Image (cartoon, grey):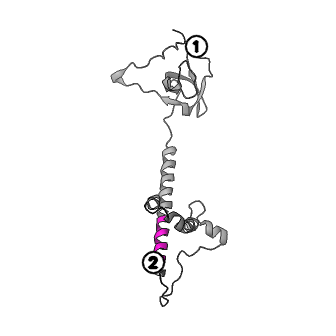
């Protein structure tokens, strides 16, 4: 059921939940090319009950219209969720800029403990540092300060390419020394 319709009519969520479940289980998934209902029972379920035109049951038309509306809202929600997942996947699929030997990079301060009273006062990135060795596709050895007594190999997710802008150069040629005492 579409989230907006739940906020407009909050009780409709429980009323139409079985129909939303049916719509989800009757939806043909891209991976299997079959619906969960078809995989479980061996046939595709019919979405709408057969109402004979000569029978007049009070409220049946209204019930059927509500059922059709709830099913369409559930299908729209599933399509919206699928589009969101597709967008997130495509966003993550774009590879980051390749790093090479002797490139300068920023090092994320996420896992570094430095002499700052609070983590929020510490810089988010340190550097720029030069890549001195490429270890596979995602690990890089950096030339750090001698005073830093940490491992020199870092994962690609912790590195951001350093880009020198001519208007402001030379920027950040060397990292400032750490001051522990005054």
Q: Residue lying at the far top in this picture: please name it.
A: 182
Task: Name the image quarter holding residue 31.
Answer: bottom right
Foreground residue among 178 and 140: 178
Foreground residue among 58 and 72: 58
Q: Residue 180: in sight, yes or no?
A: yes
Q: Residue 103: in sight, yes or no?
A: no
- Circle nearer the N terminus (2, 1): 2
* Residue denoted by label 2: 62
Q: Which residues are magenta?
A: 63-73
Main secondary-structure element of the magenta-colored stretch: helix
Is 159 located above or below residue 84 in the figure? above
Look at the numbered disc 2 and give the secondary structure of its residue.
Answer: helix
- Which numbered tag is attached to residue 147? 1
Task: Name the image quarter holding residue 23.
Answer: bottom right
- Magenta-drawn stretch contains 70: yes
Assess disc 1: are there few (<14), some (14-19) or many (≥20) residues with their C-alpha within 10 Å of its C-alpha.
Answer: few
Q: Position of residue 90 (x, y in %)?
A: 49, 48
Is 117 located above or below residue 22 in the figure? above
Is 50 located above or below residue 120 in the figure? below
Q: Position of residue 84 (x, y in %)?
A: 48, 53
Task: Name the image quarter holding residue 38.
Answer: bottom right
Residue occupying the point 62% across, 65% down: 36
Residue occupying the point 54% across, 69% down: 19
Q: Nearer the viewer, mark 2 or mark 1?
A: 2
């Amino acid at each position: 059921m579409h989230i907006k319709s739940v906020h407009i009519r909050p009780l409709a969520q429980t009323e139409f939940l079985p129909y939303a479940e049916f719509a989800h289980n009757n939806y043909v998934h891209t991976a299997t090319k079959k619906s969960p209902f078809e995989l479980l029972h061996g046939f595709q379920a019919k979405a709408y009950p057969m109402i004979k035109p000569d029978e007049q049951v009070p409220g049946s038309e209204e019930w059927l219209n509500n059922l059709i509306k709830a099913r369409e809202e559930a299908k729209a929600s599933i399509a919206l969720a699928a589009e969101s997942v597709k967008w997130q996947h495509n966003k993550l699929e774009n590879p980051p800029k390749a790093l090479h030997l002797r490139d300068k990079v920023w090092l994320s301060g996420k896992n570094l403990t430095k002499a700052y009273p609070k983590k929020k006062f510490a810089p988010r990135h340190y550097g720029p540092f030069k890549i001195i060795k490429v270890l596979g596709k995602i690990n890089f050895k950096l030339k750090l300060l001698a005073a830093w007594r940490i491992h020199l190999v870092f994962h690609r997710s912790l590195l951001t390419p350093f880009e020198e802008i001519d208007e402001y150069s030379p920027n950040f040629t060397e990292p400032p020394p750490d001051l522990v005492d005054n």
